[in-house]
Image (spheres, rainbow, N blue to C red):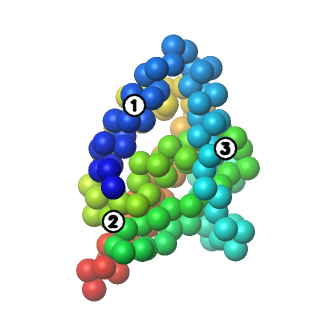
Amino acid sequence: MSSIKDIQNEIVDEFSMFDDWMQRYEYMIELGKSLPLIAEEHKTDSNIIKGCQSRVWLHADLKDEKIVFTADSDAIITKGIIAILIRAFSGQSPKDILDADTGFIDEIGLKEHLSPTRANGLVSMIKQLKLYAVAYQTQISE
């Protein structure tokens, strides 16, 4: 499995291939369409990320001491955003997720091209991914 940093670098490289933000948005939409869907039983209020304008469900399972995330959103751009985050962090250890830098988001220019409400949602998504990592790290340590 690739490291988080390697995956983030791949994402930065992919986004740098596009000349303008319309192409990047289209790419994000494609990423969202390829997102492995969350199981219907996990589309519950307790899995909705607070702070997002649209509804975003995020579920995490611990498998072989690695966190596997699944998600969905009712908004296509938001679905693309969570797809990018899941690609970077799913299948990684809680410690690696907690230690990971999220500077790649700035490198692809995502934050500066989102509306303020979507940017807040992005921060909430990252926070929720890290909260799952904290919970599972504690569980592994016990």
Please determine whether, in this image, residue 135 is positioned above or below residue 76.
below
Question: At 59% from the left edge and 40% from the top edge, which residue is drawn?
Answer: 31
Marks 2, 1: nearer the viewer: 1
The secondary structure type at the circle numbered 1 is helix
Q: Amino acid at mark 3?
A: Lys
Which of 142/27 is in front? 27
Task: Please name the residue that numbered disc 2 is placed on.
Answer: 94
Task: Please name the residue that numbered disc 1 is placed on.
Answer: 12
- The answer, for residue 28, to whether it is visible in the render is yes
The quadrant of the image that shows the C terminus is bottom left
Q: Amino acid at mark 2?
A: Pro
From mark 3 to mark 1, how far is it between C-alphas? Answer: 19 Å
Please determine whether, in this image, residue 132 is positioned above or below residue 31.
below
Task: Please name the residue that numbered disc 3 is placed on.
Answer: 33
Q: Amino acid at mark 1?
A: Val
- Looking at the image, the residue that sits furthest to the top is 19
Quarter of the image where one finds residue 71? bottom right
